[in-house]
Amino acid sequence: MIYVVIKNLPHLLKTNNPLKLIEDALVNAKPKLVFLNEEKAGHYIESELNFLNHELRQGTSYGLVVLNTDKDTFTAIKSKPKQLMEAVNGLVVKGKRIDAQMIEADQHEKQQLVEMNYPGMKPHDMLLTEPYPCSLLKMPRELWFLGFIDYALFYHYLENWVAYNAREPRSVLDLFNTQANICNSIFLAQNPEPLSLEHVRELQASLSSSLFSAETKSKSGELRDGYNSFPINRDAINVKGAVELLKRIKNDNDENGFMIGEVKHFEIVHQYCKQLSFMAGDCYFKRKNPVPFQEYSTIVTGVKAAALQETIKKVTQLHPHVSADAVEHIIDSFLKENKFDEQFLNRDKYTSWGLIDTLSVYIGQLAGKAQLIPTKDEMAFALAVARQKATINHATLKNKTDEELQTIAEQLVTSVKDNSVSLLTPDPVSAEKKAKIAINQYNLDVSKTKTPDEVILCIVTLVHELEILHVFHDVNCRTNYFLLNEELIKHGLKPTILYNPNRLDGYSVEDLVEQVKQGMHRYDYVKANAGELVKINDSFLANNKSSQSYYEKISSQLNDVLMKLTHQYQESIGTLGKIISNTATTAPGMFSSSVNTAMIDEIKKLFNQFSKDQNLLQFISALNQMSKSEMHLVMGKEFVEELSRLTVFSHMNCDFHQSMFIEKADKNFTIQ
């Protein structure tokens, strides 16, 4: 048995083809990375991490690939992929062993469903039996983050909120605060209004507050103003979902609508910055002595022009279909956006020394940034090229039969494993229009629902549509995931903890409905198995007191809101309980006393049962079936009004509960 250290192994597991990337890493593994036991391999990893500062350490990860072989045989089979991968016994990531057969996403998800004993969800199991704030407070605070991120990250990739937050600093704070806002919106709204695009924008603004905080003009809550796209990941699409997408593209028959193709980052600005930085640095070393501003200006202007021509040459050689004019336009926009002339060709700012060197360093830093994040014009150009070269669009699908669409869908899902494929979204004007139509249709449809299944179908249909439309610049998936749970809670249904929320775009609506039901069961599972899951989470934190302290801080607003709402709920229950206990079984002056006595006894019986099981849904559903006029006479005006307030506040779905009760009674009824 040998243990091979692989840098960033946790990241490789999340890619479209983890087995191939693990194979490549093993082939390229140097002898110093191969160990005979796990302990020595662990010491090596720790020594490597010790060289890094705190920030780099948080962004760097290692793992072990365990092989059933020895060092010599490992070296010999590196050139034989089949034998090499057959020797892989498993992985060790963050101290946890992962069997080789569980590397693929579909396998570890199946394992998780087995572990939580998912039997399918019956309608009555989908309903909340107490207000959501009370329900969430029964889950340890340390685990609340599981309701906001991919459960797969925690279960299989062995990450918690810390890794999520490291990728996008302060993003987890936005998750918690948004959920606090949602709770206030649901449970304190005096006159709830139908869902609107404006509300969805408010959600996105809250969730993206930190992401866009450094920008001069924040995109939080702003609809996109150009075309957009998002990658189709292997674990976020299935054949049925692909067929639905293809049929949508065909039926829309819109040249400005959905397409599927490759979005290529041409790195035009990156190439230019590299050239400019190098040339400026070269000039600096050749002319270390100060020069007059006019001479300096001539040098910098010449370097700018030379770097432009060199960039045009390199880009057009690599990509013949890219024109010199397009390259020049993108670079010109970049220079204007970064106020290049104002910074480096301004006589008032010229200090006679160091500016050429400063220019070289500054542009060199921009080169690194531009390689990761294309500029707005660069991205717009990449999307325009992608749409021009898209292999799947309304024209290519126009005459395809359903059988042919099925074949194309199967090929698409297979190709995603080894190719970069993206869904290209409609133009911004039609995307906004389609989003409003979808929301209006949702409001109409959901008002007519009679079962939890119908509500889930309505919600999933909406969030799937909003997700593929991608109406925002970023944070679309998070927005739609939060919207999904907000609407579930509004309708008295349990929230869902999705294994992979990114499937909201590439899975079929039917399969997404099932994913939501699995997530509802997962919500119950997390609450029921909280002790074990808290231990796992603690092991990820490894007694990191600063992380634990930060978590308390970022979750404090949500905690305060939940406590406030729960207190309000308990006061309402206390009011009802006091009235019930003070109501005599017989009341002087009341007529039809036998009926009144029966009602009082029944209400007391129901309240005693509620006191034991805390099933508010059952309690108020039973009360709401009683005659309100009779209840007013027997229990008094205050009781009826408090019950009405509690029913509205709690968002218990008494209608669904009662209809299930009647249906069950009908099924059990037989004619003698």
Image (cartoon, grey):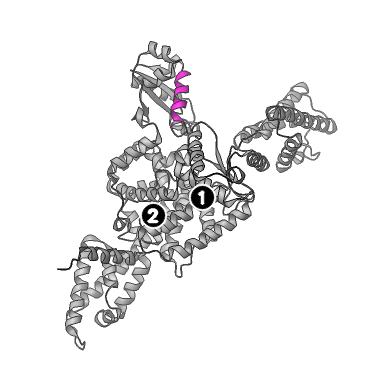
In the structure shown, which secondary structural element does the residue marked by tag 1 occupy? helix
Decide: is 318 above or below 554: above
Tell me where residue 161 appears, x and y as whole percent: 42, 42
Tell which of 409 and 183 is nearer to you. 409
Q: Is residue 14 magenta?
A: yes
Tell me where residue 354 appears, x and y as whole percent: 74, 30
In the structure shown, which secondary structural element does the residue marked by tag 2 occupy? helix
First reached walking from the N terminus: tag 2 or tag 1: 1
Q: Residue at x 40, y 44 (%)?
A: 549
Compared across the picture, whether 542 is left or right of 194 comes to: left
**Residue type, numbered disc 1:** Glu
Q: Which residues are magenta?
A: 13-29
Decide: is 2 above or below 253: above
Kindly report the distance in space between the C-alpha atoms of the residues bearing marks 2 and 1: 29 Å
Tell me where residue 90 appears, x and y as whole percent: 35, 26
Tell which of 221 and 515 is nearer to you. 515
Mark 2 lies on residue: 559
The reply to whether residue 543 is visible in this rendering is no
Q: Quadrant of the N terminus?
A: top left
**Residue type, numbered disc 2:** Asn
Mark 1 lies on residue: 467
Q: Are marks 2 and 1 in contact (CB under 8 Å)?
A: no
